[in-house]
Amino acid sequence: MYTPPKIERFNQNVLSKYHIYNSVFITLPFDAIDNTGVLLPLFSEVCESGFSKEWNPNQIFEHFSEKYLDDQSEENKISLMFRFIQYVERQVVLFDAIEDAAFPVVNNLEGKGSLRYIKERADSEDVLNELKTLLENFSVRAVLTAHPTQFYPGSVLGIITDLTEAIRKNDLVVIKQLLSQLGKTPFIKKEKPTPYDEAVSLIWYLENVFYQTAGEMVHYLQNNIFKGDEIGNPIINFGFWPGGDKDGNPFVTNEITLKVADRLRTSILKCYYNDIRDLKRKLTFYNVDNLVYEIESKLYRSVFYSKGEIFITLDEFKAKLEEIKKVIITEHQSLYLNELDALINKVNLFGFYFATLDIRQNSKIHDAVFATIIAQDLKKGSSIFPENYSNLSEDEKIKALGTIKANLNPDDFQEETQSTLSSIHAIKTIQENNGEFGSNRYIISNNESALNVIEALALFRLSGWENPSVDIVPLFEVIDDLKKADKIMEQLYTDEN
C-alpha cells in the first residue's frame, strides 16, 4: 500500500484543512468587525506584492488604503489594522489546532526516535540489558519557564483543546461553533497577568499534556524494557520557574512562591483523583472497592474541601495502591492491573509536587544582602562573621563562609534582605508540604565566581539550615563567565568545606 511522503501528508491533513476551515472562519459574522475577514485576504495579497517590490510597511498599507479604503477615515483605517491582528491571532490558533489534530498522521509516532523503535533496536542488537543499565542512570529534566507574551488565557486554551478534538473527528458543526466562540473570546486580559496567573497558565499544560504523556512514557519503559520491575530512577522530571524566578521580577514574592507550590500540589492531587474515579468504575471487586473508595474520599477532601490540609500522605497513598495491587493479583486474576500500574507509575513520577519549583535570584542581589547582614552583624556584635571579613580575599571569604552558623530572623531586616532570607524559609515550607522535590534547587543567575555559589549556600546556614537538601545551581550567562566556568566548578568541587 502506498504511503504518501511526509510533506504530502502535511499538505493533505494540515494545509488543505486550514484553507477549508479558515474560509469558514473569515466569513463568520462578529460584532464590530464586519468585512474584516473579507478584506484580510486582500491585504495579504497586497503585502506579498509589496514585499516583492521591497516596499516598506507604510508604502504597503498606503497602497492597500488607496485601493480598498479610499472613503475611510484615518481612525477607521487604524481600527481595521487592529482587527486584522485579532483575526491573525485566531488564525494562528486554528492552524495550531489543525496541526495538533494531524500530528499522529503527519508523523510516524512509532518510527525512528520513538521509545518503541529504541526498544526494538535494542532487542535486535541484543543490547537490552545495556539499555536498562543506561536508563537506570539517565534522566531528562524539562524546565517550564515563563514569559507573559507566551500565554493564552485559560478560556482560549480550553477552546484549542476542544477544537483539536473536533477537527480530529471532522465534526463540522462543532468546529463552526468553536470558531465562532474563538472569534468572540478575548485573547488579552485588560489587567497584566500576575506571576501567579502565569504559573496557573503553565500548570494547565502539566495537567492536560505532561501528566498523561510522561506517565505513558514511563509506563511503556517499565512494561517493555524493565519487564514490570520498578525503574527506581526518575527518568523524566519537571522543573517549574513561574512563581520562583525572582531575578528581575519584584512581583514574585514569597507569598506567591508558596501559593504556586500549593497550586502545584492541588493540581497533581486533582489528577490522581480523576484517575482514581476512573479506576473506581473498574475495581469493583471484594476487598478492593473499599480501598479505592477510601483513597477517593481522602483525595476529594484534600482537593475540594481543604485550606491547605492534606488528608492522605504520599506514603499512605502509595501503600494503599500497592495493597490494591496485591489483592488484584492474588484474588482477582490481575484484572485491570495494567491500569493500576499506570497510576502507580504516575505517583512515583510526580509525587505530591508535580514539578520542582526552582528558586532563582541574581548574584548581585546576594552581594547586597550579604553587605546588609555583615553590617548588622558588626553593629550588634553578633560575631557571626570575622570582623575583617570585608577585607578578606575571595579564598579567605570562602573558607570563612564554610564555618558560619546562625538562625537569622528575616523580619529583623528590610526589603531585599528580608525577601531573600524569607525565600529560604519558603523552600523549607514547600519541602515539608510537597516533599523534598517540591523545591530543591536554588539557582544563581549571573554567577561570576565560586564565592557567589558559597554565598548562596551560606544563606541556608545563616537561616538555621546547616545541611540543606537543596542543590545550589550556578548559572553562567555571559561570555566572560562561561570562559572561566570550568575553573570555578573545579574550585568548588575541590573545596574541602
Image (tube, helix red, strand yellow):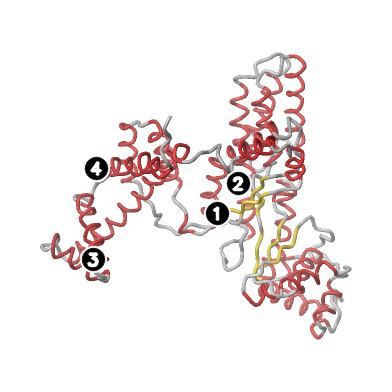
Q: Which residue is mark 2?
A: 263
* Observer-nearest of 106 and 323: 106
Q: Secondary structure at mark 2?
A: helix
**Residue at the limit of the structure toward the left, as seen here:** 71
In this rendering, is residue 109 above or below 489? Answer: above
Q: Where is the N terminus found, in terms of image quarters?
A: top left
Q: Which residue is mark 4?
A: 28
Alpha-carbon distance for marks 4 and 2?
38 Å
Residue 196 numbered tag: 1
How many neighbours does mark 2 have within 10 angstroms: few (below 14), some (14-19), or many (20 or more)? some
How many neighbours does mark 4 have within 10 angstroms: few (below 14), some (14-19), or many (20 or more)? some
Q: Secondary structure at mark 3?
A: helix
Alpha-carbon distance for marks 3 and 1?
43 Å
Alpha-carbon distance for marks 4 and 1?
35 Å
Q: Of label 4 and label 1, which has the lower sequence position?
A: 4
Task: Report which quarter residue 29 is drawn in.
Answer: top left
Which mark is in front, 4 or 1? 4
Residue type for callout 3: Gly
* Observer-nearest of 70 and 430: 70
Q: Secondary structure at mark 1?
A: helix
Verify CB contact (< 8 Å) between mark 4 and mark 2. Answer: no
Which mark is in front, 4 or 2? 4
Verify CB contact (< 8 Å) between mark 4 and mark 1. Answer: no
Picture residue at 61% right of the left edge, 30% below the top: 275
How many neighbours does mark 3 have within 10 angstroms: few (below 14), some (14-19), or many (20 or more)? some
Q: Of label 4 and label 2, which has the lower sequence position?
A: 4
